[in-house]
Image: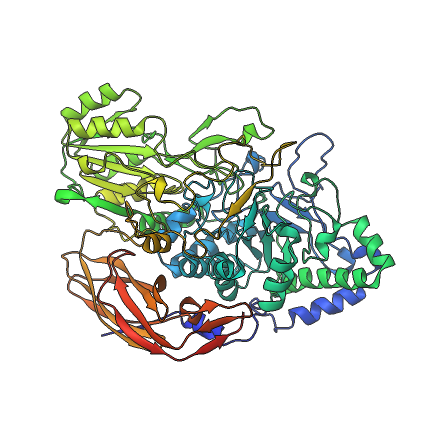
């Protein structure tokens, strides 16, 4: 019987004092001291070199790229006299971004954030981070704008695909490990976008209203856990407003929460075009990014002039430089200079991407054991989703495209300034070709799905039909609703009516409704599965991979169940990649106190809603049982058993179900466990005390009394609760 202790890292960190930046390998822990020495040696004119930079893309006339810049997200000049290299920044969480194809190079595309989160596997996500960070380094970048962790508050948010779901413990833990992976390459990673960046509609001016406690217990807790585990050198602030202030000029978010309460020693960089004025520096912003997209360069001469005339500004300017250089030295940028042309093992990296995709695939339905397909399956019809061409990917700054460009790129058209960015891109990884390779004896046919009647007719003569249904998603746009677009619901319904042995493979950027669900044999959620997505999908369909993914988000049964049935502003604002406030537009407010910190499954539990598919849901080709839950304070021990016939992995989930005030559901711990058939394992989970606490204004408080915990197959299928009596406890903010 093997004992496995979870979150030892988290527990150790929780006992630490305010988190200082993790020292890079070989750093003697004095990054901040070194930074102070360097700042002391700076000349006045050097003090506004690191505090602002350009978007490193030759966008528009007069945009001159510095000769040593690498086409990517950003470039901050260095200070050669002091041995400080330029900061060369690339996006993002899913790999080295495409940058409009300007580098004409190859990058390995990880699957989407929701795919990564569906693995519930921190070690795997760290491996993915390590891989993409190594490619960033090899291309000459020393800053990776990774660590996207905004919680899914609205299932229609266009950037949900990039992020890690709706729960702060799961998302915070995974993003922390992703950041550790990226920074293991001696480059700086961000965590982004602080905070409450919950929609793309009106993203530059939507004003989020939320109580401190609700923010601390949800979105901010994800950032806090991610920073404790990952120790990112930089935090990127968001476009939106919070309590009336631009997030990049929010004294509360940046100075009070991040720097004072959490003790963050690195630097805050703005999002690109997110700086409202010079005074943002006094509110905690340390670096202006993508300055061409702002109304002016605030953090250059204007900042220097303020520092020259006012000692408070001079002190703040020194602090800005100290923070940037603390991150620089902590990550080891000085001792490990980057240069383009580094060697990349794309085959090995693609295997990492494929493993992440395989572990991120969620089996949602499997009637009559329709899956896995026998390799002797004779007559397989594949329909739709451009399944012979490639796999879908999400759009925007996180877009990664491999060598030779996308397998297909479908322009959406439009007239806005960034309409050219709105392309539906497919990765060069064909599920159809991968299935043919997996089952050489089978006869595979393909129908595009453009004609419903043609696909239904072809379905009649097939042994099994696999319909690929895709929902494109991208930065700058929100989904209009949760329906599959482009008539795919009707296509699936017609095909399933023609052949009940119909399997649906979804490639979506978030949850979707499934009016055809009961007429299908199986449903597989593959998300945007990355550069080897076709192979990962085929591997699950034919049973080479036993699916182990579990949903990191709730699939609502209806939009009427949502805290905001209509996404704020969607019914009156034009979709616009930049999302700037149109002249004369009324202010836009998002009231997140409706759900507060009860996102997704917690909202459903509070409201008594049942999900279409709940958070944590995922089937396997095997069967697992969890049992013997014992609670000892904030430590839980239980047994996981594989009672099926094949090796597989599951995700054991521990939920708090009640506190002394009454019912309150929260994920309290989790562990992905891989077991041979018949084997079992005892797991120990240490619960982060903040999960069971309430935020009470100057910190967290655990009220004394009885708490209930239960093991869960998912957020709605819970075992018998076990009580634990906890003493009163205060925890620092
Ligand atoms: C974008 C995104 C941010 C990205 C940055 C640089 O608009 O919001 O995530 O890192 O600009 O491309």
Q: Which residue extends farthest front?
A: 661
Q: Is residue 536 above or below residue 13?
A: above
Which residue is at 67% across, 69% downward?
32
Which residue is at 38% across, 51% downward?
600
Q: Is residue 444 visible?
A: no
Quarter of the rendered image showing ligand 1: top right
Q: Position of residue 425 (x, y in %)?
A: 44, 32
Which residue is at 30% across, 36% downward?
431
**Quadrant location of the N terminus?**
bottom left
142 on left or right of 33: left
Q: Is residue 148 above or below residue 417?
A: below
**Quadrant location of the C terminus?**
bottom right
Q: Nearer the viewer, residue 411 or 274?
A: 274
Image coloring type: rainbow
Q: Nearer the viewer, residue 610 or 500?
A: 610
Q: Position of residue 610 (x, y in %)?
A: 28, 49
Q: Position of residue 233 (x, y in %)?
A: 59, 60
Q: Nearer the viewer, residue 574 or 529?
A: 574
Q: Position of residue 443 (x, y in %)?
A: 18, 29
């Amino acid at each position: 019987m093997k004992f496995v202790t979870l979150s030892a890292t988290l527990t150790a960190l929780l006992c630490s004092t305010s988190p200082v930046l993790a020292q890079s390998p070989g750093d003697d822990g004095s990054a901040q001291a070194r930074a102070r020495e360097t700042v002391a040696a700076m000349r006045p004119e050097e003090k506004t070199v690191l505090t602002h930079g350009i978007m490193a893309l030759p966008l528009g006339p007069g945009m001159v790229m510095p000769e040593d810049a690498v086409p990517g997200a950003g470039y901050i000049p260095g200070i050669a006299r002091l041995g400080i290299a330029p900061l060369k920044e690339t996006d993002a969480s899913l790999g080295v971004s495409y940058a409009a194809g300007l580098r004409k190079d190859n990058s390995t595309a990880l699957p989407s954030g929701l795919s990564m989160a569906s693995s519930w596997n921190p070690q795997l996500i760290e491996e993915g981070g390590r891989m993409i960070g190594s490619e960033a380094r090899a291309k000459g970048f020393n800053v990776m704008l990774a660590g996207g962790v905004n919680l899914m508050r609205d299932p229609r948010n266009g950037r949900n695909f990039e992020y890690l779901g709706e729960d702060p413990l799961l998302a915070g833990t995974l993003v922390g490990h992703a950041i550790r992976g990226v920074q293991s390459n001696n480059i700086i990673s961000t965590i982004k976008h602080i905070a409450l960046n919950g929609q793309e509609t009106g993203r530059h001016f939507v004003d989020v209203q939320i109580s401190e406690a609700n923010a601390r217990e949800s979105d901010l807790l994800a950032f806090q856990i991610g920073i404790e585990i990952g120790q990112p050198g930089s935090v990127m602030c968001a476009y939106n407003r919070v309590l009336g202030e631009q997030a990049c000029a929010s004294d509360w978010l940046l100075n009070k929460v991040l720097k004072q309460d959490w003790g963050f020693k690195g630097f805050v960089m703005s999002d690109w075009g997110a700086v409202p004025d010079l005074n943002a520096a006094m509110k905690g912003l340390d670096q202006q990014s993508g300055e061409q997209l702002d109304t002016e360069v605030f953090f250059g001469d204007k900042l220097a002039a303020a520092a020259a005339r006012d000692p408070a500004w001079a002190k703040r300017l020194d602090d800005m430089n100290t923070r940037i250089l603390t991150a620089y030295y902590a990550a080891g940028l000085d001792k490990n200079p980057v240069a383009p042309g580094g060697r990349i093992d794309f085959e090995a990296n693609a295997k990492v991407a494929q493993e992440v995709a395989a572990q991120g695939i969620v089996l949602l339905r499997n009637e009559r054991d329709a899956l896995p397909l026998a390799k002797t399956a004779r007559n397989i019809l594949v329909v739709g989703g451009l399944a012979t061409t490639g796999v879908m990917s999400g759009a925007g700054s996180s877009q990664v495209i491999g060598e030779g460009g996308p397998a297909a790129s479908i322009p959406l058209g439009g007239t806005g300034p960034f309409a050219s960015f709105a392309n539906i891109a497919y990765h060069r990884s064909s599920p159809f070709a991968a299935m043919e390779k997996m089952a050489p004896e089978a006869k595979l046919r393909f129908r595009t799905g453009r004609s419903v009647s043609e696909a239904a007719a072809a379905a009649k003569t097939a042994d099994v039909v696999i319909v690929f249904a895709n929902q494109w998603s991208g930065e700058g746009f929100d989904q209009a609703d949760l329906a599959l677009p482009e008539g795919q619901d009707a296509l699936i319904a017609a095909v399933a009516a023609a052949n009940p042995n119909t399997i649906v493979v979804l490639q979506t950027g978030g949850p979707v409704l499934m009016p055809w669900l009961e007429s299908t044999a199986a449903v597989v959620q593959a998300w945007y599965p990355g550069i080897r997505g076709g192979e990962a999908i085929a591997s699950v369909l034919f049973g080479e991979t036993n699916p182990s993914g579990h949903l990191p988000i709730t699939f609502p049964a209806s939009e009427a169940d949502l805290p905001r049935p209509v996404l704020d502003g969607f019914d009156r604002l034009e979709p616009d990649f930049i999302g700037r406030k149109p002249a004369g537009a009324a202010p836009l407010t998002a009231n997140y106190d409706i759900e507060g910190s009860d996102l997704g499954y917690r909202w459903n539990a509070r409201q008594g809603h049942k999900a279409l598919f709940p958070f944590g849901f995922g089937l396997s080709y095997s069967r697992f049982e969890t049992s013997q839950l014992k609670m000892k304070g904030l430590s839980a021990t239980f047994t996981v058993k594989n009672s099926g016939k094949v090796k597989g992995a599951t995700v054991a989930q521990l939920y708090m179900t009640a506190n002394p005030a009454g019912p309150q559901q929260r994920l309290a711990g989790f562990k992905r466990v891989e077991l041979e058939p018949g084997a079992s394992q005892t797991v120990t989970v240490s619960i982060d005390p903040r999960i069971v606490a309430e935020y009470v204004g100057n910190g967290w408080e655990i009220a004394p009394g009885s708490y209930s915990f239960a093991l869960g197959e998912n957020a709605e299928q819970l075992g018998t609760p076990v009580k634990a009596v906890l003493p009163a406890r205060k925890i620092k903010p």
